[in-house]
Image (cartoon, rainbow, N blue to C red):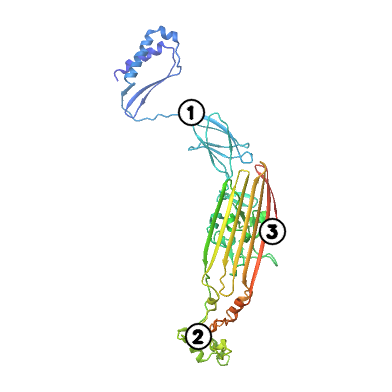
């Protein structure tokens, strides 16, 4: 500290003799408790004539320089730690943000990565922002993919945002357009392709079971060709001949959801409240189901194959009363009417012995009356038959195969798929089977900056095979006319039961149903906020 005044004097002599302007002189305390003497000169050029003519100034300057070289202007001192704030040099970057159609994107977010410094684009898509040198801009907008662009000083950015078709959980199809999920005011349920594809089902309706809250899907028949019913807002009618089924739109057009291959579905939106009627009118009092199918993706050709092998079993099957309990019940009923019981004590004892396995000679539960006739199977049969268990198989095998191809360029993309389903029936008598063939083709093209074109075709063929007698009224008398003491087969192995015989020997009925759909659509963008859509379906 004793030498400090001396060097200050030298500096003062220097600034008196040299034509410089003193800007600041400060002491800075370092981590080691050292005071650094810092001086800043505003003017960095000296008058050469004045400097050469003044030797005293030159000597003072050399003296200070030697001191700086030997001792870095630091002396020991005591004090607390202080921080030195460094201000980075900033540059101004500007540009414009557009969509794939060349239209400006209004309100796009422009933010410097890693900071809170940001701005949004104006009505013309332009922006201007001051950022640190070497920064990266993060540009984002709802429905478009986020981009990160390094900043180059003096370069005007021209950014084109690409649509993000994978934001299915964030953007919801609602009527004529899309809306962000968090901004929805109506009741909307969503089912995505990932959820649907993970379910081994035979139809898109079955795939929706349990996925959308408030969506009720029921069936009153296990027949292979029967479609399940859908209800969104409960059971109700408007008048004679009406029903409470929701309006179903496939890619914007009315259609049957059961004709769509579940593997071809991109997402399903279910408009559940009465607000749907404000768009679709009187056709939508019980809700609307909007089905969006998959479309081609830009890039290399992609081939996808998946299959499903499954085994089905009947559930919740009713159980028949055993034959002895049935005979006791029938005899009590006859006694209440004042008539003799239909079953003798000998026949009832045979029922008990049959159930206990005492017959070992291949008896089936009905003895022969003569060489050409059997005894009365209604009152003299002693088998123990569960007609429900005998009618249906324990397990049935089914398989499904699906292959799809997608690809294209920025201007044109395509998607094609083929689906095959082989669903076996549960009937133990006769042949029951469902085979479904489903093909889909879809082309999406950008004709101009303001005009797009979509074309899709869908073909579905259902081949149903079932016994002729297996009609809707078949179950009406199945339990009533099949007493448990009646055997299914006689001792020769022939069917000796009315209902199974009708299924096995009454012939087969085959039915083939073809459905072919064509759909074309033009999308005309008049401006950023206004789109026109023209659709035609055959």
Residue 465 in view here: yes
Judging depth in this view, the residue of 156 and 518 nearest the camera is 518
| Closer to viewer: mark 1 or mark 2 | 2
| Closer to viewer: mark 1 or mark 3 | 1
Instruction: Please tell me how crowded label 2 is: few (under 14), some (14-19), or many (20+) other residues with Cα within 10 Å.
Output: some
The span from disc 1 to disc 3 (Cα, nearest Å) is 64 Å
Q: Position of residue 505 (x, y in %)?
A: 61, 77
Instruction: Quickly name the residue at label 2.
Output: 363
Instruction: Quickly name the residue at label 3.
Output: 282
Q: Residue furthest left?
A: 2
Q: Secondary structure at mark 3?
A: helix
Q: Is residue 90 above or below residue 440?
A: above
Instruction: Please tell me how crowded label 3 is: few (under 14), some (14-19), or many (20+) other residues with Cα within 10 Å.
Output: few
Whichever of callouts 1 and 2 sits on the residue coming sooner in the sequence is 1
Q: Secondary structure at mark 1?
A: loop
Image quadrant where one finds the N terminus: top left
Residue 89 is marked as 1
Judging depth in this view, the residue of 375 and 1 nearest the camera is 375
The span from disc 2 to disc 3 (Cα, nearest Å) is 66 Å
Whichever of callouts 2 and 3 sits on the residue coming sooner in the sequence is 3
Circles 1 and 3, Cβ within 8 Å, touching? The answer is: no
The image shows a total of numbered marks equal to 3
Q: Secondary structure at mark 2?
A: loop
Whichever of callouts 1 and 3 sits on the residue coming sooner in the sequence is 1
Circles 1 and 2, Cβ within 8 Å, touching? The answer is: no
Q: Is residue 69 above or below residue 517?
A: above
411 lies left or right of 21? right
| Closer to viewer: mark 2 or mark 3 | 2
Instruction: Please tell me how crowded label 1 is: few (under 14), some (14-19), or many (20+) other residues with Cα within 10 Å.
Output: few
The span from disc 1 to disc 2 (Cα, nearest Å) is 103 Å
């Amino acid at each position: 500290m004793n030498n400090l005044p001396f060097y200050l004097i030298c500096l003062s002599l220097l600034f008196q003799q040299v034509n410089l302007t003193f800007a600041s002189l400060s002491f800075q305390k370092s981590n080691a408790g050292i005071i650094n003497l810092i001086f800043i000169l505003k003017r960095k050029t000296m008058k050469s004539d004045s400097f050469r003519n003044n030797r005293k100034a030159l000597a003072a300057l050399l003296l200070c320089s030697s001191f700086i070289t030997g001792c870095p202007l630091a002396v020991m001192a005591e004090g607390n730690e202080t921080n030195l704030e460094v201000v980075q040099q900033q540059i101004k970057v500007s540009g414009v943000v557009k969509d794939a159609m060349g239209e400006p994107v209004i309100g796009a977010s422009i933010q410097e990565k890693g900071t809170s410094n940001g701005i949004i684009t104006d009505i013309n898509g332009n922006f201007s922002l001051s950022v640190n040198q070497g920064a990266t801009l993060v540009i984002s907008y709802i429905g478009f993919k986020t981009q990160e662009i390094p900043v180059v000083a003096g370069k005007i950015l021209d950014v084109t945002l690409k649509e993000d078709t994978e934001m299915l959980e964030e953007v919801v199809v609602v009527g004529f357009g899309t809306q962000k999920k968090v901004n929805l005011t109506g009741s909307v349920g969503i089912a995505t392709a990932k959820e649907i594809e993970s379910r081994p089902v035979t139809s898109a309706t079955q795939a929706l079971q349990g996925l959308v809250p408030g969506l009720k899907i029921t069936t009153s028949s296990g027949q292979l060709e029967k479609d399940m019913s859908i209800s969104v807002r409960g059971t109700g009618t408007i008048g004679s001949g009406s029903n409470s089924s929701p309006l179903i739109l496939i890619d914007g057009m009315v259609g049957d959801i059961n004709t769509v291959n579940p593997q071809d579905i991109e997402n399903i939106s279910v408009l559940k409240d009465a607000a749907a009627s404000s768009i679709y009118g009187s056709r939508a009092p019980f809700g609307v189901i909007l089905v969006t199918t998959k479309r081609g993706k830009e890039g290399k050709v992609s081939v996808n194959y998946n299959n499903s092998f499954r085994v089905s079993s009947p559930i919740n099957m009713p159980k028949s009363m055993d034959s002895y309990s049935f005979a006791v019940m029938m005899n009590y009923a006859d006694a209440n009417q004042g008539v003799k019981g239909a079953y003798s004590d000998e026949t009832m004892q045979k029922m008990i012995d049959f159930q206990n396995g005492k017959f070992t000679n291949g008896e089936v539960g009905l003895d022969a009356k003569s060489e050409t006739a059997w005894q009365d199977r209604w009152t003299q049969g002693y088998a123990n038959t569960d007609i429900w268990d005998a009618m249906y198989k324990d397990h049935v095998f089914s398989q499904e195969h699906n292959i799809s191809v997608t690809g294209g360029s920025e201007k044109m993309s395509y998607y094609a798929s083929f689906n095959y389903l082989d669903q076996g029936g549960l009937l133990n008598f006769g042949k029951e089977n469902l085979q479904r063939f489903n093909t889909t083709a879809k082309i999406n093209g950008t004709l101009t900056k303001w005009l797009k074109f979509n074309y899709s075709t869908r073909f579905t063929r259902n081949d149903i095979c079932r016994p002729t007698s297996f009609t809707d009224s078949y179950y009406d008398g199945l339990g009533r006319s099949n007493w448990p003491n009646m055997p299914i087969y006689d001792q020769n192995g022939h069917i000796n039961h009315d209902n199974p015989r009708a299924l096995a020997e009454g012939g087969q009925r085959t039915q083939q149903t073809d459905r072919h759909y064509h759909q074309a659509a033009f999308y005309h963008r008049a401006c950023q906020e206004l789109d026109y859509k023209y659709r035609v379906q055959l």
